[in-house]
């Protein structure tokens, strides 16, 4: 299964992700520091959990090559939370955000992936797949506007290249074949669908930050 095939299969979910207000704000150079900062802090919490889920999945597959890929991805994820938090504290100058734990959306996403992995390797890999499949679009949206935005420039240490993002997708899809994903996805694969919706909800959570801060008088 290729990434294009998977995205076509769940085109409605991918379109919903692409239409998130977060990307409109990025495209119009209207993203606020507290919005991108809120996203980075919550994503740091998520990535700490994703690191563990990748390690768990490596224990559920027998193929040494697949084990190696999953463990490498787990190691790659390990350093990213610190990068995100450094950007928030030093570059965006929002150290107060670092005191915030996972919000309800992030906790729900983390719990969903943990439960999916506990249900089995196929469910587990399906639950992490949207994170990888949607990431190249996220990267392209950020990098296409980085020259116009000082805020986005500060976030670049946290953002891979689009080439790297697409390579990671192909690696995870390759691993997925050892979990029974060689064939086209079945309609309504619940772990995939729920994770895709959480991916969009994470962006939505960040965009609501401005409204919440206004209500609090910040």
Image (cartoon, helix red, strand yellow):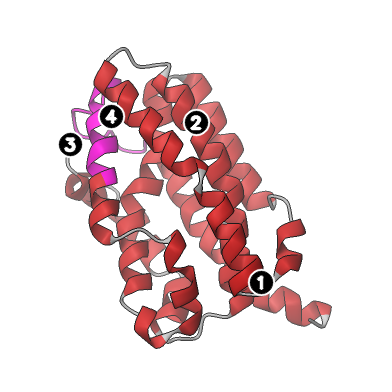
- Which residue is identified by label 3? 1
Q: In the rendering, at what x and y percent does residue 121 appear?
A: 40, 21
Q: Are marks 3 and 1 in contact (CB under 8 Å)?
A: no
Q: What is the crowding at mark 2: few (fewer than 14 residues within 10 Å), some, or many (at least 20)? A: many
Q: What is the crowding at mark 3: few (fewer than 14 residues within 10 Å), some, or many (at least 20)? A: some
- For residue 2, the mark is none
Residue 70 visible? The answer is yes
Q: Are marks 3 and 4 in contact (CB under 8 Å)?
A: yes
- For residue 176, the mark is 4
- Which residue is identified by label 1? 209
Q: In the rendering, at what x and y percent does residue 98 appear?
A: 71, 59
Q: In the rendering, at what x and y percent does residue 212 appear?
A: 73, 74
Placement of 8 over or under 151, stated as above or below:
above
Query: For the N terminus, which image quadrant?
Result: top left
Q: CA distance from mark 3 to mark 1?
A: 37 Å
SS for dot 2: helix
Q: Nearer the viewer, mark 4 or mark 2?
A: 2
Q: In the rendering, at what x and y percent does residue 178 appear?
A: 26, 21
The reply to whether the magenta stretch includes residue 177 is yes
The reply to whether the magenta stretch includes residue 25 is no
SS for dot 4: helix
Side of 143 where 158 appears, left or right:
right
Q: CA distance from mark 3 to mark 2?
A: 22 Å
């Amino acid at each position: 299964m290729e990434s294009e095939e998977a995205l076509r299969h769940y085109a409605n979910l991918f379109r919903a992700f692409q239409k998130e207000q977060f990307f409109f704000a990025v495209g119009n150079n209207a993203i606020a520091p507290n919005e991108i900062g809120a996203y980075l802090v919550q994503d740091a919490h998520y990535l700490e959990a994703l690191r563990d889920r990748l390690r768990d999945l490596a224990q559920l597959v027998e193929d040494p090559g697949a084990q190696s890929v999953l463990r490498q991805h787990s190691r790659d994820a390990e350093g990213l939370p610190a990068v995100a938090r450094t950007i928030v504290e030093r570059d965006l100058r929002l150290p107060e955000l670092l005191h915030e734990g996972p919000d309800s959306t992030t906790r729900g996403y983390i719990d969903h992936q943990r439960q999916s992995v506990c249900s089995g390797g196929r469910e587990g890999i399906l639950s992490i797949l949207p994170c990888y499949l949607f990431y190249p679009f996220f990267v392209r949206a950020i990098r296409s506007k980085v020259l116009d935005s000082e805020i986005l420039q500060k976030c670049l240490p946290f953002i891979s290249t689009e080439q790297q993002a697409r390579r990671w997708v192909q690696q995870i899809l390759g691993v997925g074949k050892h979990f029974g994903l060689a064939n086209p996805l079945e309609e309504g694969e619940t772990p995939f669908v729920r994770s895709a919706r959480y991916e969009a909800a994470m962006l939505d959570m960040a965009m609501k930050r401005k409204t919440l801060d206004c209500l609090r008088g910040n």
